[in-house]
Amino acid sequence: MIATFSHYALAFLRPARTSRAVMTVKDTYFLRVYDPVDPSRYGVGECALFKGLGCDDRPGYTDMLEKVCRDIAAGRTTDLTEWPSIKFGLETALRDYDNGCCRWPFPTPWSMGQGGILINGLVWMDTPDIMLQNAILKAEAGFRCIKIKIGAYDFDCELRMLDRFRRLYGPEKIELRLDANGAFAGIDDAIDRLRRLAPLDIHSIEQPIRAGRWEEMGALCASSPIPVALDEELIGVNSSDRKQDMLRTIRPSYIILKPSLCGGFSGSDEWISLARANNIGWWATSALESNVGLNAIAQWTSSLNTTIPQGLGTGQLYANNIDSPLRLDGQLLRYDPSVKFGI
């Protein structure tokens, strides 16, 4: 087996704002493994580097990709514990190759066109008025679970926006998730804001304070009137012991799994096992991958028989995404096997 990789710059249709940064372009890499005798037989995976967030955003990224390619040619395995996005891409490419080179790393009835995966609608940060308009558009498009990113603007303005939305769509109509991306200053600030948000019947809030403060986050989870979900907190926690220690220290209501940031599919499977053992809920989401990575995450998710809305709707953010069989049908993500991937 031989492997190669190539760089690809994904261009956002419009600037994507979080509490950390505003993004217009996202770099990613496609890893291809193939049979040297028959190069038409190949598997593809996306090494979805997330600059500014992933623990593998550091010097030597392409050097490690070159090492992976050399090791594959030599029949050696590569320790990618500290390189989760490369591990994610390699696991996808190898599974795709083994399963017939049809971009089916996890063949399931869903990837053969049967049924759909329930997903949440996503509202990116913008002015509160535009965020309200976009949330209404998501509701009218058929989403019954909507996630809204907060933390970039004045909290009182965001609170008024959320209240206006809730007056239009009560909890019996829309499940409302929030994502603070670590924007709240500390536990006192977070508790105050969460108490003001609680009357709006919020399903959960992701990462209210920045990652790495386990004791503080644990105290927040214990006293929060809104269930807390961990997102960035999982990044860089790669050993089983550290994962177990973190979950037992913080005791969140949910964890959110991004395989390209959480150790690929094998690392994410381990997170799920530990979460179940500690009575913690979970759902999967994408991390701004192209349709190649999104497809792999969706197929993996479909193999887990999930019932709650997943966060797999970011494939429409880019002007130059890879053509794929992924289709949105209201709040369902579907796969059309009659459509070929453009890679």
Image (cartoon, helix red, strand yellow):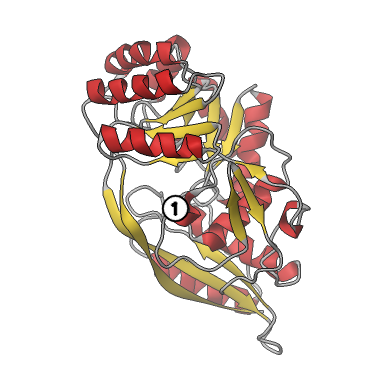
Direction bottom: furthest residue: 37
Residue 133 in view in this figure: yes
Indicate the quadrant containing the C terminus: top left, top right, bottom left or bottom right. bottom right
Circle 1 Cα neighbour tier, 10 Å, few/some/many (<14 / 14–19 / ≥20): many
Q: Is residue 101 left or right of residue 328?
A: right
- Look at the picture and state if 170 lies above or below 144: above
Depth check, front residue: 178 or 46: 178
Please identify the residue farthest to the left as the structure is shown: 154
Considering depth in this image, is 277 or 18 the residue closer to the camera? 18
Percent coordinates x, y for residue 20 in the rendering: 28, 42
Q: Residue at x 66, y 67 (%)?
A: 103
Q: Position of residue 19 (x, y in %)?
A: 28, 38
Image: 282 above or below 215: below
Compared to residue 52, the image places residue 229 above or below, namely above
Give the secondary structure at mark 1. Answer: loop
Q: In the drawing, does residue 166 fall left or right of residue 141?
A: left
Where is residue 29? Give x, y as percent: 46, 68
* Residue at 76%, 59% in the rendered image: 112
Residue at (26% x, 46% y) in the render: 21
Q: How many marks?
A: 1
The part of the image, by quadrant, that contains residue 58 is bottom left
What's the amino acid at mark 1?
Leu
Does residue 82 appear left or right of residue 10 in this picture? Answer: right
Residue in the foreground of this view, choosing between 299 and 90: 299
* Residue 1 found in image quarter: bottom right
Q: Is residue 83 visible?
A: no
Residue matched to label 1: 288
Pinpoint residue 154: horizontal percent, then vertical percent: 21, 27
Q: Is residue 130 above or below residue 198?
A: below
